[in-house]
Amino acid sequence: MSIPIKISGIGYYVPETVISNDDLAKIVDTSDEWIKTRTGIERRHLLSGNETAFDMGLAAAKKAIEKSGVKPEEIDYIIAAACLGTHIYPSTACELQAALGADKAVCFDITAACAGLIYGMGISKAFMDSGMAKNVLIVATEALSHCLDWSDRGTCVLFGDGAGAMVLSVAEDGQNDILSIGLRAQGDLGHYITMESPGKNCSLVEQNDEGQMYIKMNGREVYKYVVTKLPPHIEECVEKSGLKMDEIDYLVPHQANLRIIEALEKRLNFKHEGVISNIQEYANTSAASIPIALAESIEQGKMKLPCTAILTGFGAGMTAGTAVVRLREGIA
Ligand code: COA
């Protein structure tokens, strides 16, 4: 049974430290011009000092909860999406539960990389449809600067740190905000983007090199995969939503690369003024990029509420997820 779900609150947080393309050119052989023309990225916000993925996630979660009007003790599930949480365990979701005082929440982390928010929405919907949850908090928090080889110019220029959060609630007024949702995975292409576990065999069994937990990526193949596979998946979700592409106000894509966003806009024939992008400021913040783009655009008045929007993400796995949503006033 499908029950009406309300997107009741969204929040985001980004660290204060800003690193420009020119700054990066001091540590790797790159240039502002190369990065800007290939990706659209101009700056990224990075963690510093003792601040962690958990801290960012907590700040974003508090904002989303405040906007939602839901009390922490009313949250049934906390789902965290993070490439690298502060700890492998306890999970980021459990850490958030304790800090928020969401005592009755069931907590777990998911690994769906940049599609993490949409995967979290799909899981939340299943819990709500089955009667297992009334309120779910999804927190995407990404400390990608801790996962990068800062001597690899092919990856280190592309990513940034940040967090976004969303509260979903059973809609008491009967208005459904999740018009359609679709999730995909293609594990046979998993080698396009990888981050190895540092775990190694026991030294009594064999000697091992130190593990290196860095993001590695075949950027060209990722690019080709996304621009060919994502548009039909988005079109399918739009059809399921009952809306037509030109009736939807905004397209909020995962912020991986401006060229990919432009290719999606063109391929979907989406109105340019409705395409949301802030990649120039934050670079690719993986699962956090969609909620950051959403909450920031609403806050800055670039997205006018109420509205309809396509949220679409893709990433390591390869994973992809798209949701066609209605966004009410006062959610961010
Ligand atoms: N600065 C300067 N030169 C760089 C560089 C950098 N930061 N990174 C790579 N290069 C060089 C390469 O070494 C290569 O040089 P060569 O021709 O002498 O060997 C050249 O630029 C072209 O490299 P290539 O990787 O083929 O570039 P590209 O045009 O494919 O652009 C990406 C690279 C990563 C920007 C592009 O492939 C991309 O955006 N892919 C999608 C990645 C993505 O979205 N990932 C996240 C998914 S969630």
Image (cartoon, rainbow, N blue to C red):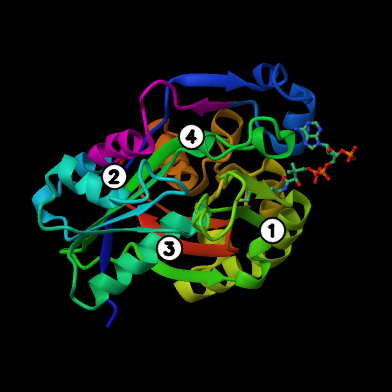
Picture layout, residue 319 above or below residue 32: below
Q: Quadrant of residue 32?
A: top right
Q: CA distance from mark 1 to mark 4?
A: 21 Å
Please tell me whether mark 2 or mark 3 is closer to you in this view.
3
- Residue 180 percent coordinates (x, y): 43, 70
- The magenta span reads 44-63
**Residue 206 disc label:** none
- Residue 112 percent coordinates (x, y): 48, 60
Picture layout, residue 285 above or below residue 196: above
Q: Quick check: can you spot residue 294?
A: yes
Picture layout, residue 294 above or below residue 81: above
Q: Quick check: can you spot residue 269?
A: no
* Location of mark 4 (residue): 161
**Type of the residue with mark 2:** Ile
**Residue 331 disc label:** 2
| Residue at image point 29% right, 78% down | 2
Q: Quadrant of residue 48?
A: top left
| Residue at image point 64% right, 30% down | 150
The residue carrying pointer 1 sits among few (fewer than 14), some (14 to 19) or many (20 or more) residues within 10 Å by Cα, namely some
> Sequence order check: which comes first, mark 2 or mark 3?
3
The residue carrying pointer 4 sits among few (fewer than 14), some (14 to 19) or many (20 or more) residues within 10 Å by Cα, namely many
* Location of mark 3 (residue): 119
